[in-house]
Amino acid sequence: MWDRFVNSLIDRHIYDNSKILDAGCGLGIFGITTRLRHYDKNLYIEGCDIHQPYLEITKKYNIYDKVQSDDVAKMMLYTNKSFDLAIGIGVLTHLEKSEGMFFKSQLERIATNVILTGAQHHIHNHKSLQNDSKIYALSHKSTWSHKDFKGYKIRGFHPRGSSGGSLLDTWLYPPLFTLSAIHPGFTRLTQYLVAWK
């Protein structure tokens, strides 16, 4: 449901000749799925990430029109409103809070529309191909709340203390998602946030 919701937000901002920045693109999952869902449109999608092994994979498979290694400070090199949409999916949690706030402000500056996600609570550091906690760039460093996203629309996902997948998650997911749509304060009961504007 989380991926479907983020994809639906992305889809709202896609039209022919859209310019998209996938900031913290990782292996290019959102780049690939966006291209597949909008195969009939001419899209320019740029990916950037600080983790070089991921960039090599995205280059090898030509996922993006342009791929570059960017840390948060280099976001300043982009000109104002140079993208129609900027996404930072799963990036904020991997930045220190001050870096994350700067990252968010830069995406707001360089794009007309912004979609961000962040974890509200630390329950683990992923150990997988995508999120190896032994790699500093991929370890969790901060948590986020709805108060960090003034002016954004917010939804909460997965019950607090969970990363999803259990039967309890299946039962609690719809009411928590609905409550977070009614008032952002209810996101305190959830593990992850999706914020967009």
Image (tube, helix red, strand yellow):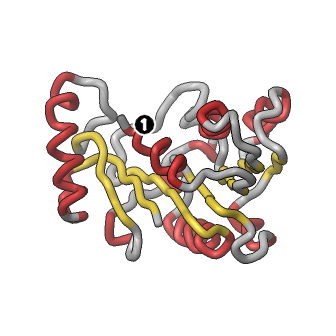
Measuring 54% from the left and 26% from the top, which residue is drawn there?
Answer: 128
Residue in the picture at 70% in, 64% down:
83
> Is residue 197 in view?
yes
Q: Position of residue 117 (x, y in %)?
A: 46, 53
The residue depicted at 60 percent of the width and 26 percent of the height is 129
Quarter of the rendering containing residue 65: top right
Residue position marked by numbered label 1 in the rendering: 4
Q: How many marks?
A: 1
Percent across and percent down for residue 168 are: 16, 28
Q: Nearer the viewer, residue 67 or 65?
A: 65
Could you say which is closer to the camera, residue 120 or residue 125?
120
Disc 1 marks a residue whose amino acid type is Arg
The image shows residue 187, relative to residue 51, as above or below, that is: below
For residue 96, side relative to residue 137 (left or right): left
| Placement of the N terminus among the 4 image quadrants | top left
- Crowding around mark 1 (Cα neighbors within 10 Å: few <14, some 14 to 19, many 20+) is few
Q: Position of residue 25 (x, y in %)?
A: 66, 44
72 vs 52, left or right, is left
Q: Position of residue 148 (x, y in %)?
A: 39, 70
Res 135 quadrant in image: top right
Quick check: 134 above or below 129? Answer: below
Q: Nearer the viewer, residue 27 or 131?
A: 27
Residue at 71% across, 42% down: 41
Of residues 46 and 164, the one drawn nearer to the viewer in this rendering: 46
Which image quadrant for residue 183? bottom left
Q: Is residue 141 visible?
A: no
The local secondary structure at tag 1 comes to helix
